[in-house]
Image: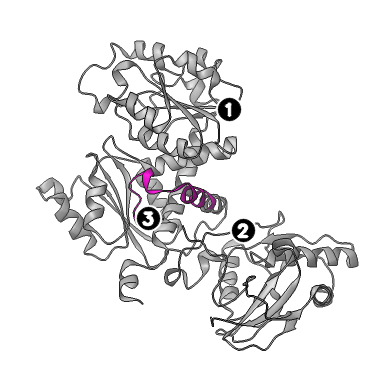
Amino acid sequence: MKKHLLSIDDLTVDDVHALFETAAEMHDVQRRDVKKLPALRGKTVINLFFEDSTRTRSSFEIAGKWLSADVINLSAKGSSTSKGESLRDTVLTVTAMGIDGLVMRHSASGAAHQVAGWLDIPVINAGDGTHEHPTQALLDAYTLTRRLGSLEGRHIAIVGDLTHSRVFRSGVKCLTKLGAEVTVVAPPTLMPSGITAWSKDAGFATSYDVDAVLPTADAVMMLRVQKERMSGGYFPTAREYTVGYGLTRSRLALLKEGAPILHPGPMNRGLEIAPEAADAASSAVLDQVSAGVAIRMSVLYHLLAGPSAAAATTGE
Amino acid sequence: MPTHDLVPGDSTDASTGPGRIVLDFQDVNRALTRISHEILERNRSAEDLVLLGLPTRGVPLAKRIAAKILAVEGTAVPVGELDVTMYRDDLRSHPMRSPHKTVVPAGGIDGKTVVLVDDVLYSGRTIRAALDALADLGRPAVVRLAVLVDRGHRELPIRADHVGKNLPSARTERVGVRLAETDGTDEVRIAEGRGA
């Protein structure tokens, strides 16, 4: 496994399976009275979040703490970046304090790649702009694997705001890597430009017709409409989006029986997903949250539990 | 991704090469029969007994001991698996290992007599890790240790309660345990090799 986790491209299929196997063991730890493993005792991990996040940050924090690492959360608000410090200076200053791993979220696509080039310690991309969110993709695929078994040949529909979604970009890579057939569905205005060529290379399908795709899907992943990233009008009204692309109560009937419904959260209930779908027995939304901790424990363990960079270079 | 089944120190290398057979199929069976009887004698019965195998080869050994106890005593002793990967003190000096499963029997381990079962006892560091792992799972009344082979060279004050065979060995030698469940055959070999 590579030193950093910046993109799903960094992982081989074997890496993904190894991460899943470890995550399954970590999942069991969540059911114990003592939710603590000593694997990262004495290591310090910084969650450096330049962009708001509650679930990803707390998920990484819990994951680190359950592995006995010391976890420090830093957010851009109130940090030196709001005083004008450059990203490079902020990151180098933070890591000069002797930390062992950096979990980073940034609103700029490629920020994690940039930072990884400056540092000797493992960098985990917790979302960079509209680019990638590899641990989210892993936890989604892991959740689906637990529900469906092998993803080989399974048909997964990803529906919603593709243009602004890093979850979709990482997700489609991870699911196709594991052998799933993926169809992404969005209104033309929320379909990323150039997706036709990309989908041919990467082997996934695109569609504008959610009603045609849902009946053949073994699982459906709804994406959040990212209103905060939208500068223009991508659809006339919220109502129109819901009618065209929302997982409404009537669309639930189109799904195969028991087909898992995923949503990376936070959900806009009534917009992209109806409450009936969010709360359905087949909804895997809360499974995703608990899988998120297990996957992040697994990632932290695989990247940080081995010899440190310093020990490796001095031959300790 | 490098994952290692092999635990440096407490060696269970099944690919040691020819070497010399120190326990064959029948010897292994006899050793386990004796250990099973010893466990029953020591515990006076099979009540409140839990066997926890240490992956990889401790698990099938624990199951075999449970089967023998069932045959003798008519009591099905709960068998679990205890992975110690996360509790090893050499995690940061060796390549990454993926953890195995930890399975605690339904009745738990609180107040029970837990017998840890492993194939080879060597430095004792695996058992130290197992005791730490156990403490996170509950509080047994008693913890005992059963091993198929004790090859000496302890680095910690740990000893086994039940030993299949004491096998004095040089540190440079490799002790390889093979079991039908994991390797297709039952035997213990000792061979010259890389020291631990």
Neighbour tally class for label 1: few under 14, some 14-19, many 20 plus, Cα within 10 Å: few
Residue A46 rendering spot, x and y as whole percentages? 30, 56
What separation in Å lies between label 1 and label 2 (alpha carbons)? 29 Å
Q: Amino acid at mark 2?
A: Thr
Precedes in sequence: disc 3 or disc 1:
3
Q: Amino acid at mark 3?
A: Lys
Of B72 and A211, nearer the camera is A211
Q: The magenta stretch spans which residues? A: A1-21
- Quarter of the N terminus of chain A within the rendering: bottom left
Q: Residues within 10 Å of mark 2 (few under 14, many from 20)?
A: many
Q: Secondary structure at mark 1?
A: loop
Q: Which mark is residue B196?
A: none
Q: Left of A242 or right of it: where is B147? A: right
Q: Tell me, yes or no, if residue B146 can be seen here.
A: yes
User: Label 3 lies in what chain?
Assistant: A
| Residue at the spot 55% in from the left edge and 39% down from the top edge | A145
Q: Nearer the viewer, mark 3 or mark 1?
A: 3
Judged by depth in the image, the label closer to the viewer, 1 or 2, is: 2
- Residue A31 covered by magenta stretch: no
Residue A51 sits in quarter? top left
Q: Which residue is mark 1?
A: A281
User: Image point 50% across, 63% down: which residue?
Assistant: B97
How many labels sit on residues? 3
Element under label 3?
A: loop
Residue on which the image places disc 3:
A2
Q: Residue furthest front?
A: B18
Name the residue carrying label 2: B102
Residue at mark 3 shares a chain with residue at mark 2: no
Does the magenta segment cover residue A6? yes
**Category of crowding for the residue at label 3, using alpha-carbon neighbours closer than 10 angstroms: few (below 14), some (14–19), many (at least 20):** few
